Amino acid sequence: MQTLPKCPTGIKGLDEVTSGGFPLARPTLICGGPGCGKTLLSIEFLVRGATQFNEPGLMMAFEETAADLAANVRSLGFDLERLIAEKKLLVDYVYLERSEISETGEYDLEGIFVRIAHAINSIGAKRVVLDTLEVLFSGFSDMQILRAEIRRLFRWLKEKGVTAVITAERGEGTLTRFGFEEYVSDCVIMIDHRVTEQVSTRRMRIVKYRGSAHGTNEFPFLIDSDGLWVVPITSAGMNHPAFTDRVSTGVTALDQMLGGKGYLRGTSVLISGTAGTGKTSLAAHFAAAACQRGEKCIYFSFEESPGQLIRNMRSIGLDLEKCVGQGLLKILSHRPSMYGLEMHLALINRAVSDIAPKIVVIDPISNFIAAGTGPETEGMLVRLVDFLKSRGITSLFTNLIRNGFTPEATDFGISSIIDTWVLLRDQEKEGARSGSLFVLKSRGMPHSKHIRQFSLSDKGILLGGSDPVISSAR
């Protein structure tokens, strides 16, 4: 089947969510409020085109000079001056003053068309950006003329055969200020930067894409030192690979409770318990075992810094510093309240894509509730579990059970999607506290139903007793 020709943007994740990029030789409208990243997305579209696809680009800017734009994106690694010197990029700043335009009487875009055409021909531009539409049309007071000129501009860009990106400010109750541009655009993408409970999140949504199927969900995206990163996951998928090999838990006695071989590779593991029961210690043993096998592991720690985690695990005989030094273990620590849930998902996605680990530890997931509501957190965790499973990554999550809550439940309702669930308990008896561990469930493998005594020593984790009965596999 013949599909609509597309122009790859080269922006990470964006080509995936647009199924190949922007419509080739057609205009795309990028709309959003101030500071959401419209200009940056447009510049990266030109830079990636010039550097990755050998397509020269033209930036017609109406708000910022070439020098200002070059300075603003230099921190992202974009060298506009070099691309301009190599004639791979042309930045043309057009100063438009509304009061001056009003004094001249009649006004249309003919002069702008001549200027854009000359710029396109001078470098053979294949990509064109107009930033922003509101400034370009600031001199129009007659809405009929304005609509006619906007329609003429989009038609003219199509006739020039360039892939165009046009930025526009969002209006009151409408996608754009004039409320008309989205109807004449072949592709409309809305981006925003919202702040909820002092936590900011950037999101992108494809509102319209003529001639191409597209998702209607919102995609979170990051702006960091490498430019934009769109996270191409919004819903849970069920096409996970099913592995039959096992990975050790890092604790021999726990491996024995799981059929003698540990967790199934590529599955999800939940370790839950009240404070101080040993959840992080079990997670750290799992991470250390992965490193001993020579597998890469990312440990997302939301309560302890890398230094704290390394020090604390050293007290039970684990040398995580050695794993870090070997480049097999990456400990990433930050507070859950620092970002929104979508941003956490984006950051985890990016780290996993960059490092390509076999094992991922999230410790603990209970702190995510501080960044969103219960249903929002549940949705984010389901997507995270499915994302990791789709990549064949074995994931381990720890969860803090608050006093008074049922141990065989979580605050987020994700127990149904977890493959293996290990519960830690703490009991008080005769003036002393003692711990216990048991496997609540483990899909696809025989596992112990026995409750074992659980304790920590300077030699690691100790499990008391033995397993008289091993259940059959489900």
Image (cartoon, grey):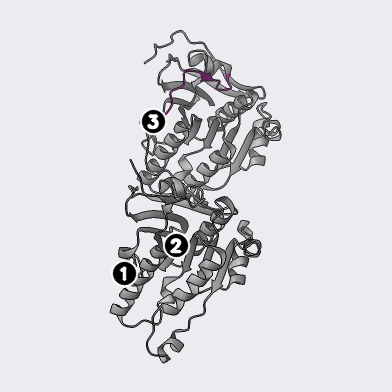
Q: Is residue 355 above or below residue 51?
A: above
Q: Quadrant of residue 22?
A: bottom left
Crowding at dot 3, Cα within 10 Å, few <14 / some 14-19 / many 20+, comes out as few
Residue 117 at x, y = what percent? 48, 70
Residues drawn in magenta: 240-251
For the residues bearing labels 1 and 2, Cβ distance under 8 angstroms: no
Residue 165: mark in rendering: 2
In primary-sequence order, the first of circles 2 and 3 is 2
Q: Is residue 312 above or below residue 126?
A: above
Residue 341 at x, y = what percent? 45, 48
Residue 254: mark in rendering: none
Note whether residue 35 is visible: no
Instruction: Give yes or no for residue 248 being in the magenta stretch.
Output: yes
Residue 239: mark in rendering: 3
The quadrant of the rendering that contains the C terminus is: top left
Residue located beneath label 1 in the image: 179
